Amino acid sequence: MQSLMRALAAFILLTHLSAAAEIQAQLDRESVPAGNGALLTVRIEGRAQPPVIPAVPNLIVNSRGQSTQMQMVNGMTSVSTTYTYAVGSNAPGDYVIPPIEAMVGNQKVASQPLKLKVLDSGAAQPPAGMAPTPPGMPQAAEEESGDAGEKRFGFLTVELADSERNHVYVGEIAPVRIRAWLPADSRANLRSGIQPEGKAFTLHNVSDQPQQTQEMRDGKRYLVVTWFGGISATKAGKFPASLSVNATVAVRDASAPKQPRRRMGGPFDDPFFDSVFDQMNAPMIQKDVTLKSDDQEIEVRALPTEGRPAGFTGAVGEFKFDRAEIPNRWKTGEPQQITAQLSGSGNFALMNAPELSPADPWKTYPGKDQFSAGDQASFSGSKLFRFSAVPRKGGAQEVSLAFSYFDPAKESYETIRSPVQKIEVTGEDLVEVETAAAPVVKEPEKKAAGLVGQHREMSRSGSLVPLVSRPEFPRILSLAGALGVLGGILAAWRNHRANPERLARRALEKATRQALDLAVRSAAAGEVSAYFGAARLALQHQLSGLWNQPAQAITLAEVQARLAPDSPVARFFQEADRHEYSRQGTGEVLPQWRALFDDAMASITPPTR
Amino acid sequence: MVSATPLEQANQLHQSGDFAAAASAYEAILQQGGPRASIYYNLGNSYQSLKKYGPAILAYERARVIDPRDPDLLANLALARKAVAVVEDVTIHPWVHAVVHYLSRNEWSWIVAGAALTLGGLGLACGVVRLPRRFSFAAAILASLLLGLGAGVLYLRKGESTHGVVLSENAAVRISPFEKADSIGTAAQGRVVKMGAKRGDFQYVEVPGSSLQGWLAAKDLARVLSP
């Protein structure tokens, strides 16, 4: 057990020692022209915070990324991180970069100071003295290798989805397949959308969710990200269809120095597998790049003038009528609505409403249209048109709707028609009348075609800020709420006032008060019989409220049935009955009768809160 | 002799083909007389005749805020959109969209306010007098339906207060609010975008119907609701 603990301690010590802190800083050249940059690499052994590059007046330092290498050799783990910077200045002179410091654990390490001579931008960079590219720094080579180096991080290809075509027509939205080719073992993060490099083409409706596949190309395996979209052009000619996308790509650095692999025995301990393990152990380098496609030229052909139908308005694609609704009965001069729906694939944005055929007896007005996409990229779909037409000639007619478009697949114009429909137009012909009566208005030459004319009446003043966004709106809602609450309070109060129980209770209290008043007055007047009658009535009213019975129904028998015979109420009822039947009309109302009555009232009167 | 009104003068300039002067005249009328649908409509026509489709669509959109059912306006707006291949972004069912946009947000707001006041008034009246039960029940149901419908429509259209229109051709949407920041795409002229925060000379925008969002130069767009 002790030997095992010693071995473990030795392992930890060795591992710790292997992570000894060290920092190395190096410039790839001693001098650069003003405006250019040298490559500064800072390599730190051990797990460290990023180094702090000291500020030097006029010296520009831009980070170019970092890579981390981890190796285990003979059980010892070593970690090193290489930070790369572009260093330069616009002001010629001799610059000294002070020691670069970094914290490795709790230990502060510092590099040697570095010197950089920035030459006048007109001077050629001296070939002599150029520091060789340091090992483990592929960026330097890559920086100078131009496009080939950029392509190491991936590239784009763009091709027409229809592989049999290498041309598009003006106004056509041609489906394209855009593919980003990334090295198979890379990691990529796109920082922008795909955009055309030039102005000849416009990119439309690029799919939001690209497909990912693995493909071989020129003997290399790539991760291929595929989007679908459409390109269109507005003028004829041959133009480069170049696209680009900004990405951050991390690839394995095959040029990094390879560590000899420790032979451990086993099935993979064969030199044949060295290249595989070297590839797996190669450090990652990361870079912000712009992936571009080659400037593949695509021919944009003008739409042919030959065979162009008179009703052609610019639609390019392939379309068909889904429906056409023309009313059967018309009257000259009175507009009615015509509905038509066309579906297919093509450039729906350039698609205008179909025309009535024959067109002469009609005057049509621009209407509304509504596009419904049939796929995610909006290449296919349907467009619904609603427009008004006014017949100018009366009589029975046969009409249909006609729509002309250019079919890029057939490379010819097509005119489709809805089924011919018989209609009846009543009223006089309007053509001559309209022509004669129409005021001669000089149309401006540059006026956009199809534009409905100016309004001549000043409409009433409005507000661009709707009521809902104005401060009055919450006040109106508060007022409405307050009215409702007030109404609720009033209704509750009214219900409370009209409550029958409450009214009955109040009537009972009133009757009791009146009986008591009469009893007091009778006692003062010495009317014994009247006193007992009024006092008993007061008790009856009180008991009727308690027992929910009419006051007249509460007799001595009822009281004795519900209360104890010696209770004050029963005793008072007995005394009252005795005086009633004795016919003793006047005399003194004895104090003990009053006391008995007070006790009786107290025993049945609920305590006040 | 009766002198021509400013509107007549502006219309004459338009008729004569001097669209730039007509646009200036319409702008002056709006400055002096406040927002009017007819003037925004005429202004949009002048800009469209100048092939300035971004400002034209902005003017039409402003006219539509006030008068959403003017057929001339809708026809010319559709023409302008066609010219720059811009399609209105419809995210809800077309039938629902037609109902929701048949009235302006202002009109829907008044419906909500009127329905709320009717409900409050009914409550107060019921507190004061005894209304016929059938009448008060029917009125309360109708007002509640209108209130719910109007509130729902206003909720669906709440984003319109942030709408802006791209004025320039190929306006670059950048990743950061700086002139030299990388462009991540372009927003088409006349495209309606959602406007967010403003930083310096740049405005954060989201282009509906696409994943494009970033910073657009403030001079390249204008908010629909604040002339």
Image (spheres, grey):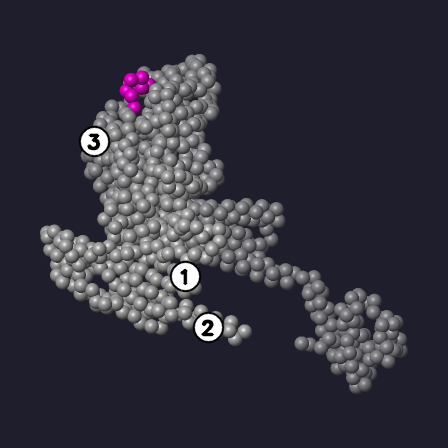
What is the span of residues highlighted in magenta in the rendered image? A303-310
Q: Nearer the viewer, residue B114 or B42?
A: B42
Secondary structure beneath disc 1?
Answer: strand
Q: Which residue is mark 1?
A: A72
* Main SS, magenta residues: loop
* Left or right of residue B195: residue B99: right
Q: Position of residue A43 (x, y in %)?
A: 30, 62
Q: Chain of mark 3?
A: B
The reply to whether residue B119 is visible in this rendering is yes
Q: Which residue is mark 3?
A: B16
Secondary structure beneath disc 3?
Answer: loop
Secondary structure beneath disc 2?
Answer: helix
Contact between marks 2 and 3 (CB within 8 A): the answer is no
First in sequence, mark 2 or 1: give its number. Answer: 2
Above or below, A565 against A450 in this view is below
Number of callouts: 3
Above or below, A455 against A606 in this view is above
* Left or right of residue A386: residue A59: left
Q: Residues within 10 Å of mark 3 (few under 14, many from 20)?
A: some
Q: Give the position of the N terminus of chain A as an image quadrant.
A: bottom right
Q: Amino acid at mark 1?
A: Met
Q: Nearer the viewer, residue A92 or A337?
A: A92
Residue A9 circle label: 2
